[in-house]
Image: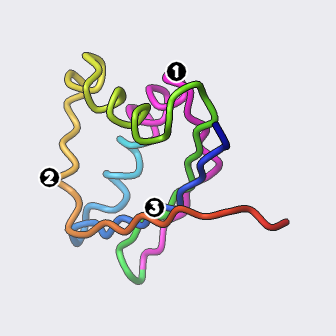
Amino acid sequence: MARTVQIRVYTVRAGLLDEWVNKWQRLVVPLRRDLGFEVYGSWKDHARSQHIWVISYDGPESFEEANAAYWASERRKTLGLDPGDYLVGEETREVEQTL
């Protein structure tokens, strides 16, 4: 399968951006990497209360299958991080690298 790359833009509840990003870095990123995803980077846009990050997958399954396995994993279920507690909006763009 070809590498799938997504840019994700999360709008975070007012006042919780730093807390969300800290927990996301400590809890989500290591699990994503353990499950075969690559996280290229992460940025905070304080003016819009947004967290922007880039993730890819290039494994034997499709991105959708690998993402479903992430959400179904026991480790994900026990992270203690519910995106609904922090996020008020989410935009996902699947992109193709040109440079």
Distance (Cα) linking label 2 and label 3: 18 Å
Which residue of the protein is positioned furthest toward the right in this rendering? 99
- Ranked by sequence position, the earlier of labels 1 and 3 is 3
- Residue at horizontal 48 percent and vertical 66 percent from the top: 93
Pick the quarter of the image with the N terminus.
top right
- As drawn, the residue found furthest toward the front would be 1
Amino acid type, callout 2: Asp
Left or right, 7 with respect to 9, comes to right
- The residue under the point 20% across, 68% down is 88
> Which residue corresponds to mark 1?
34
Q: Is residue 27 magenta?
A: yes
| Closer-to-camera residue (92/65) | 65
Q: Which residue is mark 2?
A: 85
Front tag of 2 and 3: 3
**What stretch of residues is rendered in magenta?**
25-46
Tell me which label, 2 or 1, sits earlier in the chain: 1
Q: Give the CA distance from mark 1 to mark 3.
A: 19 Å
Q: Residue 38, position in %: x, y?
A: 61, 38
